[in-house]
Image: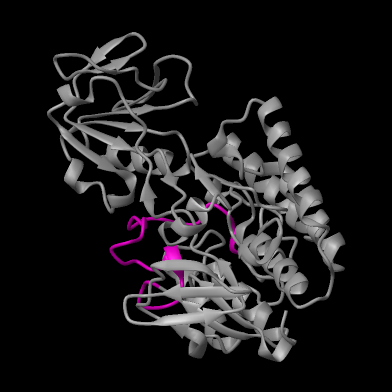
Amino acid sequence: MPDMPETRVAVIGAGPAGLVTARELLRRGCEVSVFEAGQGPGGIWVPDGRSALYDSLRTNLPRDVMAFSDYTFDSRGGGDNKWPRFPHHSAVLQYLENFARHFGLTSHIRCNEAVEVLERHGHGWRLQTATTTEFADAVAVCTGHYDLERKPELPGLAHFRGRLVHSKSYRQPEPFRNRRVACWGTSASGFDISTEIASVADHVYWCGNLFSERTALGPTRTGAPSPAGFNEKGQLLLTDGPVDIDTFMYCTGYQYQFPFLESLIREDLLSVVDNRVSPLYRDIVRPGIPTLGFIGLPFLVVPFPLFELQAKWFSAQLTGEFSLPDAETQLAWCADRLAAREREGRLPRHTHQLGETQFEYCEQLADECGLESLPDWLRLSWQDVGGARQQDPANFREATLPVRGPTVC
């Protein structure tokens, strides 16, 4: 690697992961350029045509849990004490924009410059956008995973003559007034959207693995297991019989997408299959290529704090603060991890789902790079929210939960 002041690092994406990665690299003396396809920082929190933000969306984690370690989500940092603890999505964007300004990142962000090609160039990297070619010693991929819609196959779909949509395009319930709608997917967005649509629709069938049988959830909403497909009449096939619908909405998440990495995939250096990106040591670096890092792949986590620790780990190894094991050891770790996932019966698309194991994961990263792991209060607060959501999924954002961290709520 070149000396620290000469290390040129390209960060792809100016969302939360890209911003905190750029900050950590700049703190270590690197020369940083952030390539952002959109018009400004914020990533998925920017309400443009690429985002999945519906009008009423509020965070499903409290802002004290979402804050970066040294930038509180209140009036002393990048937020406002008056904001609700589970703020509207516009507040998260404001926090991230304030973060970018506060830490001098805006001058490093090259907006409207999507990276189209990333390939190896000697000991470094070549990046190509629509307008320019750039070279870097290292690259951090921070593009997130809420872009390409995931639409699992359904038998008989060709028989359905109604409207097919994905939750990414949903903004408000009014277009679904007096409709008969099926929402497939029982994650947070599926819950929120099916609840909103049920307030105006004739009926909503909320389908997914959360249910083992058809369950009444209210006068206009029914829970049901995942559909089996459509029959020749275009009716949706539920476990206990067909139902007539005129709108089918996929609330089935997103596909990890890195079209600019095609050359690495062709060289068999990386594989991106069914949302599994491999091989990646510690879910971050390609074994044997420590200059290529992925920040922000894990999900079902406390995102901003975990991304921050990943960014510190990647930038610290990049600038020589600690050394990674040899490539063979890294590859063995990757193989062992995937084997453990398969023994647990996890689907490939759940490879990067951490949940409760995120805290053990963060301790590993912190131990390796000589930093403190996520604080205990963060784990407790994350558990508080999980318990409140399980007890009352419709109103958990209004629950009175302990405030354990430094953010004023």
Position of residue 408 relative to residue 402, above or below, is below
Rendered location of residue 334, percent (x, y): 72, 44
Position of 155 with respect to 341 (left or right) is: left
Is residue 1 inside the magenta stretch? Answer: no
**Which quadrant would the N terminus be assigned to in this image?**
bottom right
- Return the x and y of residue 401 as percentages of the image width and height: 66, 52
Task: Say above or below: 275 vs 2.
Answer: above
Main secondary structure found in the magenta portion: loop
Q: Looking at the figure, which quarter contains the C terminus? A: bottom right
44 is within the stretch colored magenta? yes
Residue 78 at least partly seen: no
**Most distant residue in the top direction:** 240
What colour scheme governs how the chains and residues are painted in the rendered image of this protein?
one colour
Residue 233: percent from the left, percent from the top?
13, 15
Question: Which quadrant holds residue 23?
Answer: bottom right
Q: Number of marks in the image?
A: 0
Residue at (23, 25) in percent of width and height? 157
Image side of residue 87 versus residue 2, left or right: left
Residue stretch rendered in magenta on the structure: 37-64
Residue drawn at 73 percent across, 84 percent down: 28
Q: Position of residue 294 (x, y in %)?
A: 60, 61
Toward the viewer: 107 or 188? 107
Q: Is residue 240 above or below residue 160?
A: above
* Nearer-the-camera pick, 47 or 8: 8
| Image quadrant assignment for residue 242 | top left
